[in-house]
Image (cartoon, coloured by chain):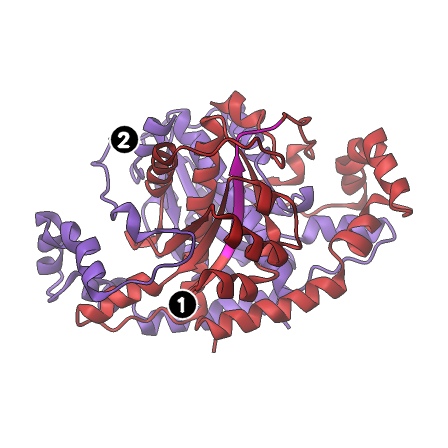
Chain colours: A purple, B red
Amino acid sequence: MLDFLKQRRTIRQYTDKAIPAELMTELLTAAAQSSNTGNMQAYSVIITTRNEIKAQLAPAHFNQPMVTKAPAVLTFCADFNRFSKWCEQRNAVPGYDNFQSFMATAIDAMIFAQTFAVAAESAGLGICYLGTTTYNAGEIIEVLNLPKLVVPITTITVGYPEKMPELTDRLPLEAVVHYEKYNDFSNEKIDTLYAEKENSDFYKNFVAENNKETLAQVFTDIRYSKKNNEFFSEKFLKVLQQQGFLD
Amino acid sequence: MLDFLKQRRTIRQYTDKAIPAELMTELLTAAAQSSNTGNMQAYSVIITTRNEIKAQLAPAHFNQPMVTKAPAVLTFCADFNRFSKWCEQRNAVPGYDNFQSFMATAIDAMIFAQTFAVAAESAGLGICYLGTTTYNAGEIIEVLNLPKLVVPITTITVGYPEKMPELTDRLPLEAVVHYEKYNDFSNEKIDTLYAEKENSDFYKNFVAENNKETLAQVFTDIRYSKKNNEFFSEKFLKVLQQQGFLD
C-alpha cells in the first residue's frame, strides 16, 4: 500500500472506457467512510458524465482537455445546504452561514475527495485535480445549479489511464516536515532543498523554454502570478458571500 | 483496499507504543507523492511528540485527551512561507499573500493530510482528526512558532489503537452524491435520508441524554451552535489577516 502510494502519478489522458456504475458506487462508499466533522457529512460531489454538461464546465477550467475527455468529472463541494435543511425541518436553528463552517465543510470535502482519489487509483483508474475550481467557482455554481451554502472546492477528472507518465519529483522531506516546532529556513537551507530540482535537466529546459532566468520566475511571472492570484481572490471571496458563507 | 477503506474507524485511544521513525518517514514520503498545486508543495506538517509541547497544544484543542495521550500529534499547515522565501532568493516576486493562494495551499495541506491518514491506517496505526485546529489557530501558531504565510488547517493524532471501536454510521450515498447537476432536496427526501439514523436506538438515546427534542437540536444547540461558529469565524479571519493571507 505504501509502495503503491509512492508510485502514483497524476493521469491527464484517459481511454474511452467508461467507469462501471458499480465501481463508482464502491469508490464513493469507501470515500464516505473517511473522517468528517461531527459525522455531519457536510460535503457533496457532483458527478458529471454527459458530454453536454462537461462542455459547459470546460471554460470554468480554462478548457483544460481533461474536462471534456475524461469519462467522469467530479466536482467536490463544501455543502451545508442539506444539513441546514434537515435542521430546519427538525425544529432546530442552523448556524452554518459563516466562515468557520465554510472551513469545516471545505476540509471535509477535501478528505472525501482525496480518499476517493486513493480509492480510484487503487482500482486502476487515474485522476487529475483541477485547481481552477476555486478560480471560477461562480461559473461552476451556475452550470451545476449549486444552491446557497454549496461552494465547489476542487474537481477531479477520472478515467482509465491512456499511458503511465514518469513519476513526478518531490522536494526532500525536510522541505515540508518539521519536528516538534516549526524550524524556519535559512538561505543556505533553501539552496540545499532546491538544489536537486534546480540542477535537473528537466527544469533547466523548462526555465529556458519559458524564457526566464530562474525556475521561481516561471511560477511568479507565468504560472501563479500575484496579479492573477489577487484577481481570483476577490472573485472567490465574492462567491463565498453570494453562497452565504461570509458577511 | 476498498474493503479496507470501508472498514476504517477513527481511533481516539492509543497504546503507549511509539511510532518507529522509519515508519513515520515512509508514511510522509507516501503522502508527499499525492497531488499538489503546480508541484509547489506549499504545505507543511509539524510532528510533535515531546510531552511538554503536546501539553502546550492541548488547550488549543479544548484539552481533548488524544493530544497529550497520542504518541504523535501532526499539525498540517497551509504554508507559502518556504516557497515565497525561495522566490525571493531567486530574483522572483512571490504573490501568495492573498486568499486564493490560501485556498490552494489549504487544499494541498488537506490532500497531504488525508493521504498520510490512509497510509497510517494501512500500516496498522489509528488516527483522529481535530477540527479544533481552525478554532484556535492563533494559539497553535504561538506554540509551534509558525511564521507568516503559515496557518494550521487540521491536526491528526496518531498511534497504535488501544481497541477497535464500532464502525460509525453514514447517510445513504444519495445524501452526498449528485449526478450530472445538483438535485436539491425536497422535505420528503430529507426525511428518507435521515430515517435510519433518526430511528436508531443509538441516536434516540443520544438525543435523550442531551435533553433535546430532535437529533438536529443536539448539533445546533450544543455541538456546533451558531453563536460559537460566529465567534470562531471572526477569530480565524483575524488569523488569516495576521498571517498575511487576507487584507
Q: Say which of B185 and B146 sits in front.
A: B146
Position of residue B108 in the picture relative to residue A242 (left or right): left
- Asked if residue B86 lies left or right of residue B14, the reply is left
- Residue B160's place in the image compared with A208, above or below, is above
Kindly identify the residue that appears in the image at 9 percent across and 53 percent down. Answer: A205
Label 2, residues with CA under 10 Å away: few <14, some 14-19, many ≥20? some
Q: Secondary structure at mark 2?
A: loop
According to the image, label 2 marks what residue?
A: A162
Q: Position of residue B75 (x, y in %)?
A: 48, 51
Give me the residue at 31% from left, 46% from top.
A65
Q: Is residue B49 magenta?
A: no
How many numbered markers are drawn? 2
Q: Name the residue: 82% across, 49% down.
A: B218
Q: State how far apart marks 2 and 1 are (Cα).
A: 43 Å
Q: Position of residue A98 (x, y in %)?
A: 65, 65
Give the residue pinned by disc 1.
B147
In the image, B175 versus B227, the foreground residue is B227
The part of the chain drawn in magenta is B153-162
Q: Chain of mark 2?
A: A
List x then y, in percent, for residue B29: 33, 39
Q: Is residue A150 left or right of residue B94?
A: right
* Residue A133: image location, x then y, percent: 44, 55
Tell which residue pokes out farthest to the bottom in this image: B247
Do the CB atoms of the residues marked 2 and 1 lie less than 8 Å apart? Answer: no
Residue at coordinates 43% horizontally, 43% vertically from top-left?
A156
Magenta-span inclusion, residue B154: yes
Which disc, if any, is residue B110?
none
